[in-house]
Image (tube, coloured by chain):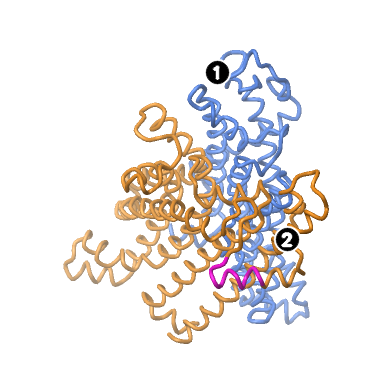
Amino acid sequence: MRWPVSFVFGAALSAVFVAAALVSFLWTPHDVETLNVAARMQGPSGAHWLGTDHLGRDILAMLMVGARTSIAVAVVAVGIGIVFGVPLGLLAAARRGSLVDEVVMRGNDLIFAFPSLVIAILITAVFGPSAVNAIIAIGIFNTPVFARVTRGAALSLWTLDYVKAARVAGKGTARISVEHILPNVANLLIVQGTIQFSLGILAEAALSYVGLGAQPPVPSWGRMLADSQTMISLAPHLAIFPGLAIVLTVLGLNLVGDGLRDVLDPRVRRAR
Amino acid sequence: MIRYLASRLVSLGLSLVVASLVIFCVVEVVPGDPAAYMLGLNAEPEAVAALRRELGLDGTLVERYLAWVGGMLTGDFGVSYTYRVPVAELVVARLGVSLPLTLYALALTILIAFPVGMLAAARRGRAPDYAVMGATQLGIAVPNFWFAMLLVLIFAIQLQWFSAGGFPGWEAGLWAGMKALTLPAVALALPQASILARVMRSAVIETLAQDYIRTARAKGLSHRQAVIGHAMRNALIPVMTIIGLQFSFLLAGAIIIENVFFLPGLGRLIFQGITQRDLIVVESVTMLLVFAVILVTFLVDLAYAVIDPRLRKRA
């Protein structure tokens, strides 16, 4: 099996981003909390590779620590979506056409109908701006996505012979769902998880940008952009680097998601 | 068709009821008493209680919910705690910015995505296709508020073709108004156009593989005629679904973009409502946005049935 070039490129971008976050636990080029107003808004140099911000903090160090915030929010938000969405999807598929299926699917339709960003803003505004509330707000909207993907794939699996055989062998619905259906939808969930992960990073950046995500002093890419806005004409690099970090990370994850789908989903492979 | 319409209408009604309940519950748990907030820290308890009565905050939850929903049905959205004017007035004024902005961005999205998506499909596997796929992959990854900041940097600060923000009002003329909304609309449209172009491409590719296209070609139509006359129309069904969804993304995205450009739209109204604890404004504007999105979804559903008669029978 040969991985497509775009997948390798995406995986490399994502790896850089994850590595930056991990390395930041042990080392950053400068301390992110040390303010040095005398050295503020400097352009890229040998001492500060990506320059300094309006308080003289090293932008590279802030981006590295900010990557942790992005990853943490997006990973937990995807986790919430999987933990609640997958069982709901499995249940709906196992009881196809029942009241449970109907309630799960209509509930999903409803969440889809909500403009997610508006509700995320409402939730974070009401419960207070914080990374945790941002995670919950993003996670809620991941739930129907995973429920729908799981249900759709599981429905077709329930008609297959080996599932019928398991039924004849005396296995219950729950056991079949866990032992036979779940492993076979795992590929799709990995692909969807990658996509939701990149969407989570965008959503976290947007919430932090409007001041409803991670709060100071926790560095976050979205807030770095918000801070840079009034100084963009004086020091464009304050806005350019955090923005590039978001774009490259999301691009990398999307390419990984596309590549994984091509490789893991035979239907897509055939269609190409 | 009538059965289909009825089932869609029931679903529309249910969605609205549940949406209103969710929004009401979320907003009602907000910490802090708006009356106490408005009167400041040193307010007398009697004054706070009087203001609570005046604002209609002293009823039970059920009474307040019914009053809120009943009011909205008759066009009475309540009175803003901070502005002291009817919320409906505020909404109408702000809608004059948000709605044109959303529609402008939607028009740009379609104008960019249709030709680009069709070009990529028609030249599948060749240079134009790769260029489109690469560019749209990048477009999807760009956060619209960052793109907006770059547009300001280039077109407002460097080139000075547009203003960096603010809105002169429609009384300054159509041209001035459109000009002020141009950078925000472009910023909103880019990521959505990238998504739509990709959907358009795969939808056209899928329809091009159908037998009726081969028949059309066999009857002597050129490739171009087959793409425009047959493939495009049939590709429109999945494309319309996405356009319907995109309306919701654009409307919600406008909230953030309005903050970048300091536009006096619904988005800024929500943020001001949030910071000033103006619950009734937050509640009503959010409900209005959700209503708009649910309504568009409903209209798209109806449009399907008009385009594709098979869907009417399935309902």
The chain holding disc 1 is A
Which residue is farthest right? B45
Range of residues picked out in magenta:
B67-76
Q: In the image, A204: left or right of B89?
A: right
What subunit carries mark 2? B
Q: CA distance from mark 1 to mark 2?
A: 48 Å
Compared across the picture, whether B163 is left or right of A231 comes to left
Place of residue B29 in the rendered image (x, y in percent of width and height, measured from the top left): 75, 58
> Which chain is depicted blue?
A
The amino acid beneath tag 1 is Pro
- Between marks 1 and 2 in the image, the one whose residue lies nearer the viewer: 2
Q: Are marks 1 and 2 in contact (CB under 8 Å)?
A: no
Q: Secondary structure at mark 2?
A: helix
Q: Determine which of the numbered discs, if any, sits on residue A44 in the image.
A: 1
Q: Viewer-proximal residue, A95 or A208?
A: A208
Q: Residue at x 67, y 73 (%)?
A: B66
Position of A136 relative to B59 (above/below): above
Q: Nearer the viewer, residue A77 or B96?
A: B96
Q: Residue at x 38, y 52 (%)?
A: B104
